[in-house]
Image (cartoon, rainbow, N blue to C red):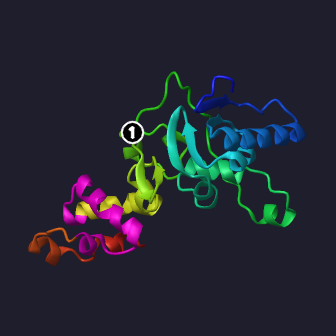
Amino acid sequence: LALQPNIIIGDEPVSALDVSIQAQVINLLIRLQKEFNLSYIFIAHDLAVIEHISDRIAVMYLGKIVELADAKDIYQNPKHPYTKALLSAVPVPDPRVTRARKRIILEGDPPSPANPPSGCKFHPRCRYAKEICSQEDPVLQELEPDHYVDHGLAAIGGFQAVNQALLDAQQAFGYTREDIEFFIKPMARTGQDPVGSMGRDIPPAVLSDRPKSLFDYFKQ
């Protein structure tokens, strides 16, 4: 602090402390942040601590960000299956809530960062994984305003159902994956038929041949 930094990076700064000391240190960090107008990059595995101190959270898997959003959104509306699994493991000091919760158990062991799997790094442990997940490495996509998810096309429209719907739509309509991504994104945000909401020109022959709209496929 003597050097008046703008950013402080803390790598597990309270992990070795007992709970009471943790609370004191975290409260001190928050007070110093307000007093000196600091920004923290706070690296930790304790999700309770992260929730208490963070304004914005990036969830990482094998060194790659898989979800990025405001802290409230991450905890109340997680999108990525890894984020959901992490949050399902957080202890809740209420037996009734604990009994009602369903723990998400990830299968398999974490791969080695030195030899990560091909495609999506999470696909060997993902319950929604399809063959394409082992071939293409997804990028962060804005699923909701200021809420980014790294789960390929599956993150945009609803995981397992969408993976199958993508195949159906490609076979039924002859759309490319780029076409389908173009359609799904507005649908995920507005809940409307992406063909109509985007106003994209679709050949009349395609419109007359298709038994359903893409929205009919993806809302199932």
State whether residue 169 is above or below residue 57.
below
Q: Quadrant of the C terminus?
A: bottom left
State whether residue 42 is above or below residue 169.
above
Which residue is drawn at the image coordinates 49% and 53% (left, top)? Answer: 128
Residue 118, horizontal then vertical, whole percent: 42, 33
In the rendered view, does 64 fall on the left or right side of 165?
A: right
Given the image, on which type of amino acid does mark 1 rest? Asp
Residue 30, horizontal then vertical, whole percent: 72, 43
Which residue is drawn at the image coordinates 40% and 57% (left, top)? Answer: 163
State whether residue 183 is above or below residue 29.
below
In the rendered view, does 75 fall on the left or right side of 95?
A: left
Residue 171, by quadrant, is bottom left
State whether residue 164 is above or below residue 138.
below
Badge 1 density bin: few <14, some 14–19, many ≥20, Cα 10 Å: some
* Dominant secondary structure of the residues highlighted in magenta in the image: helix
Which residue is drawn at the image coordinates 25% and 71% (left, top)? Answer: 195
In the rendered view, does 131 fall on the left or right side of 28?
A: left
The residue nearer to you, when weighing 30 against 42, is 30
Asked if residue 190 lies in the magenta stretch, the reply is yes
Which residue is drawn at the image coordinates 69% and 50% (left, top)? Answer: 51
The residue nearer to you, when weighing 189 against 151, is 189
Which residue corresponds to mark 1? 137
Q: Kindly tell me whether residue 65 is visible in this rendering.
A: yes
Q: Quadrant of the N terminus?
A: top right
Part of the protein shown in magenta = 172-198
